[in-house]
Amino acid sequence: MAGKSFNPFEMAQTQFDKVADMLNLDNGVRGLLRNTLREYHFSIPVHMDDGSVKVFRGFRVQHNDARGPGKGGIRFHPQETIDTVRALATWMTWKCAVVDIPLGGSKGGVICDPHNLSQREQEQICRGWVRQLSKNVGPINDVPAPDVMTNAQHMLWMLDEFETIQGSKYPGFITGKPVGMGGSLGRTEATGYGLIYTLREALKVLKIDPKDTSASVQGFGNVAQYAIRLYNEFGGKVLCVSCWDQNDQTAYTYLRAKGIDLDELLGITDRFGGIDKDKAKNLGYERLAAEAWLEQDVNILMPCALENQVTGENVHKISKKVKILAEGANGPTTPEADKFLDEKGVYVLPDFLANAGGVTCSYFEQVQSNMNYFWTKEEVLTHLDEKMTSAYHAVNDLSKKRKLYMRDAAYVIAISRVAQACKDRGWI
Amino acid sequence: MVKKSKSMDKLFGSLLERAKELNCIYEVEEIIQLPDLNLKEILIKIGEVIPSAMQFPDICRVKISYQDEVILGNDFEDTNWYIGQDIKIENNPVGWIKIFYLEKQPKVNEGFFLKDEIRVLDTIAKRVGDYIMYQNLRSMFGDIDTEQNSKARKKESEWYIVLDLLKKTDPDVFVRISRKMLNNLVWKGIAEAEELLQQFLPLLRYGEQDIVAESNRPLQTRALDDSDQLSQKVFDIATRHMSDDDILNNIRKWIQQDKTSFLVRATSNINSSLTDISQAIRRYFQMAPGEGMELSPSARIGVRAGLIRRFLTDQLEYLVIAKNFIRVRDFYDILQHLIFPPGSHGKLGGKTAGVLLAYRILKNFKKQEKIFANVKVPKTWYISSDEMIQFMYYNNLEEMLEQKYKPIDEVRKEYPHLVQLFKNSHFSNEIVQGISMALDDFGNSPLIVRSSSVLEDRLGSAFSGKYKSLFLANQGTKLKNLEALLDAIAEVYASTLGPDPMQYRSERGLIDFHEEMGIMIQEVVGKQVGDYYFPSFAGVAFSNNEFRWSPRIKREDGLIRLVPGLGTRAVDRLSDDYPILVAAGQPGLRANVSMEDMVRYSPQKIDVLNFKTNAFETIEIKDLMKKHGNDYPGIENMVSLYERDHLKKPMPFQTDFTEEDTIFTFDGLINETPFIKEIDTILKTLQNTLAYPVDIEFASDGENFYLLQCRPQSYSKYDAPSPIPKELPEDQTIFTANRYISNGTVPDITHIVYVNPDQYSKIETINELKAIGRAISKLNQILPKRQFILMGPGRWGSRGDIKLGVNVTYSDINNTAVLIEIARKKGNYVPDLSFGTHFFQDLVEASIRYLPLYPDEKEIIFNEEFLIKSPNALFELLPAYSNLSDIIHVIEVPEAADGMVLRVLMNADLDMAVGILSPRSSILIDEDEQSVYTVTKRTDHWHWRSEMVEKMASQLDPQRFGVKSLYLIGSTQNTTAQAGSDIDLLVNFSGTRAQKNELLTWLDGWSLCLDEINFLRTGFKAGGLLDIHFVTEDELSDLKSLSEKLNLNIDGLRELPLTS
């Protein structure tokens, strides 16, 4: 490719450098953490349905495993590049570290377009991937998971191949399995509940009774729905939610001043979190423009939909009453908006921490699989609460102590934990 | 309506009486068809059923006499109150049937019996006569066969016995057989025979004359005597030159042919009515219940062709194939279910023709392809096409036939009233009786009334969805059901006069064709589930896949659109839901691969008949499953169970479908049953046999596969393969493409949005990459809908990696006409394209074209200079995004190309597509097509425009508005205006500013009115039709520089006279 162009790995390195400067890390640590620990590049030959043979390129990148076995998804992408995989593996290292789970960061993938592959061919790719790597991955080295264009079915094929090669059962080899096939309960709730566990702790720290708060939620998918449920249980009142309307190809905000009724709304919501606008009207909800969720007089904003939703352009519209922005989505706030929020003293629960319930539950799946004993949903959620609570307090304490913006504090804590582990092991 | 009900009641009463008689005739028919009964047994049984047809069955007795037998019914008594009819064979009485009443009844008509009762007796006597004749004939052949078996004994006389028998019993046939033998001998080149033929000739002449002139009677007698001798000679010669077996076989064959000649005559005579033909066919099959008499191979094809011409179509392309597949028997079956007016010469229409032929073809290959044996067609009754005309005459609606010559705007306006008029009209009694019989036959099965017009489904004019099909739940009382059915038929008739089919016909030069509408009343395939009735699944399948989502899918892999419930949702493009798409030849390659897409693009709604409301309804699948999930026929093959990140196949017995989160994926059906293979084989077999790609509709009740329709793969106006000009003008060609092309023509593109692939790949920050997506989204909102195209690198909407293509969702591009992905070579490597997979199904349902470009391949034109160097309108349109102007180019095509627009022509047959600059809506392709219809249309467009602006000018007050003169220029002036053309006017203005404003307001009113007129005529809406240019006297004197100034091609102008 001619000239300079956008490179995701370079972006991840730049971000790391920024925090490394804050932490004043030495060159040895930087040298190690700026780069990946190990990379595997290999070929997967597949007999196609039409009798021809096609060779696919596969990758596994292990960025760092100082804190425990690597963890990260497997992507099927037609134009996968090694730099993308490297960047994502690096992210996984920090993500596991911020919630303090004993795992490192990995990522893998295969250059292929599942749109051009039958199920059988995809199965061959999955099995081929495991055959190439069976010595280098496993429940105690590196644990794959579903990612772009892969799902539970791909995981089961991979698990089966791995166990066949090993001659033993290793349900902890891979996560993202269906319940009953080594999957964990509580996965559906994990991200939304995780968000509210951190929010609950933040309110405690800010000395606000959840019963006295109101919130506005962007999105009405899985994360938002469970977040609202738990938040209601703690006594909070959600005044509005926004969601995508497939027919009108636009988003709407649905507002009801006395608060929304979650179960009532769920009754008129499709599988994708789209609320039936006519039925909502009949139930007394006011339909407002897409961005209206952001402008309400509430105490808490929860963006749980897409990235780049709170921007330099609209951040000024946020009500003065807003005390907390809890990021359920990935990257909902742009850097310009961050700056404004910081200045105005809005307390931000960064995505990195606040939506880590998913990866934590994945870890629990692995734990349960390894001991081949599976918890009840309540037990899973109790453990999740513990993990999220302590992770939150660690970040909050650091933020207070070092007067760091919450987002920066989360990165600092993650990177320093990894650096510490490398040092403790005497690597650097 | 009250009046209508009353007359219906009366009619209904008489219908019940008629039903008794018809039942009796049917029973007689059934008795005759019973195997293993001898003649006496049959006559006894017939005697038993006859009283049921009489007014007073209890006191009715029957006596039948045949040869030496006399058959008396139970408790028989002779009385004086009776009617009788002879049983005749070849017009000779051989017996009789008499019906007696035990008590004297009041006199009706002339005697004691109703006219209808006498008619029933006549029919039965005639039927018995035919039957006996057939039996005799059969036993005669039986004798011959037996004799043949004991050949050794009486070899010489075998055929002679037959001949002798014939001479005595049927001298006419005897003469004809002799003549045929002579012909046969002459063909064989036997000299003696030729001599004999000379002597035979006079006989023939007399024979002919005999038919017309009675005076020849004596001659005939003599000739016959002669013929006796001649016959003797003929067979003498025959014995010398042919074996006994050959002679016998020939005689046998000819006797049979002779017995069936009436059928050949009836079918080949264009004057015979449907009644005549139907009688002939009935007689033919009555003589030999079951398989029918044997026809010679050539006669069989002849009869078939005749029947096809009369019942189905005279299109030669159809006939040449159909005559080899459709059997005489099929027409016999159809006739049992055909309703037609007296003296009818109507047809069954295109839809019937299509499905019948397809069905016969599949059955023909059932030995090779066992699966075809299971293909069924739902029970159907037919109404012949001329009933529509009769219906219009009957109700004095015949002037409606002229509707087609009215301007389309009038048609559009009048249509709703016309529908009501039809629905409030009446059918003649015969037809109501026929339809009532059909309803008895259907019972309470739900029905669909389908149009089957004569024009429909012919090659080249598929009329897809132009005429109505109506569903009826058919769950009320007989009377209610009958009314609903008649109402539906009237509505379907009315749909021939709707604006859409009129326009379609006019565009294809079919407006003068005499359109008639046959009707198919068909049982709806399905099962009852709760209050609902619907098929387990239904869909449409196409031989050619015009929407390929992967380069591995070939065009000939076909396409299946599958839906749960009634197929209506598969036939139409949906705006709010999605069918499941499968390439029949490559079922493994699915359009949706990620879990999210599989779920999102699965059907959410289902079309059903609701028995409770007696209506057709669309309901949420979610609600249906909650109530009746476990009763849904074949459910385990229809759905997958959705668990977070996992779709799994349900296990029978273990799954409670009312509880589970079910997604209609049809995974079981696709992967674990031979269904897809079957459809693929059906499509290929039909395409190979018919020699054109087909489009079929099907449905399944969970057990059987039903074929509902088969027609040439339909092309809507813009889905047809576009002709590609042979010589591409180099300076006007923007791009060409030659891989993975689908069909279509996208005219009049005014804007191109080009995302420069080289510049895009150089972007360094993710925010800038995202900004490109936002800019595209904004452009999508402001550019004219479906008049711009998007061209950009790699994979539009790629979710994983923004580098690979512009980061957009479907709503960011949903107004484009074409989505073009450009794969530029990088070193030795050409990146894969997405084929629009990220929103593939949205593109399909919205008819947005997708086109992949490979600019660096050989023989490909890619005019990058035009795209990059043309003025970039991004600055004006989106000033906030001006910083992206190196990357995004928005080209206003008419500005950049002297008023021309871009046309994208795509032809999958040639695997070729081009984007060329051309004058607006001038169709410079396919001259044949143009000569057929566009010329007349084109004349039409400029003509009314011209007339209207003249009218407008005549009302323009020059003093009031300060107008010196007014000129017409452009397409209306030079007579090339098309449906979307505006009207260009030059105003020589010399008034004040206030006058100018007033003038503009005045003209604006006209502009909107003209636009409305154009909309009514063509369906085009532009928001205003006038394009006004103010000019000075000086400018008018130099047209050339005026052309440049206005950026218009002024090749002449016409002054419009203003009001004086």
Image: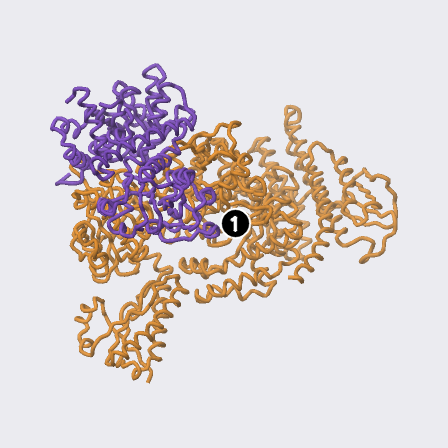
Which residue is nearer to you in this view: A304 or B220?
Answer: A304
Chain B display color: orange
In the visual, does B821 lie left or right of B281?
A: left
Q: What residue lies at 86% left-to-right and 50% top-to-bottom?
A: B81
In the image, is residue A83 above or below residue B544? above
Task: Give the secondary structure at mark 1.
Answer: loop
Q: Which residue is mark 1?
A: B312
- Please state, as top left, top right, bottom left or bottom right, where the C terminus of chain A lies in the image: top left
Residue at (25% x, 80% y) in the render: B992
- The quarter of the rendered structure image containing the N terminus of chain A is top left
Q: Is residue B59 left or right of residue B263?
A: right
Residue B311 is situated, as x and y percent measured from the top left of the image, at 54, 50
Please indicate, yes or no, whether residue B891 appears anywhere in the rendered image: yes
- Furthest residue to the front? A207
**Chain A takes which shade in the image?**
purple
Q: Please determine whether, in this image, residue A235 is positioned above or below residue B469.
A: above
Q: Position of residue B940 (x, y in %)?
A: 37, 67
Q: Amino acid at mark 1?
A: Leu
Q: Quadrant of residue B996?
A: bottom left
Q: Position of residue A313 (x, y in %)?
A: 25, 51
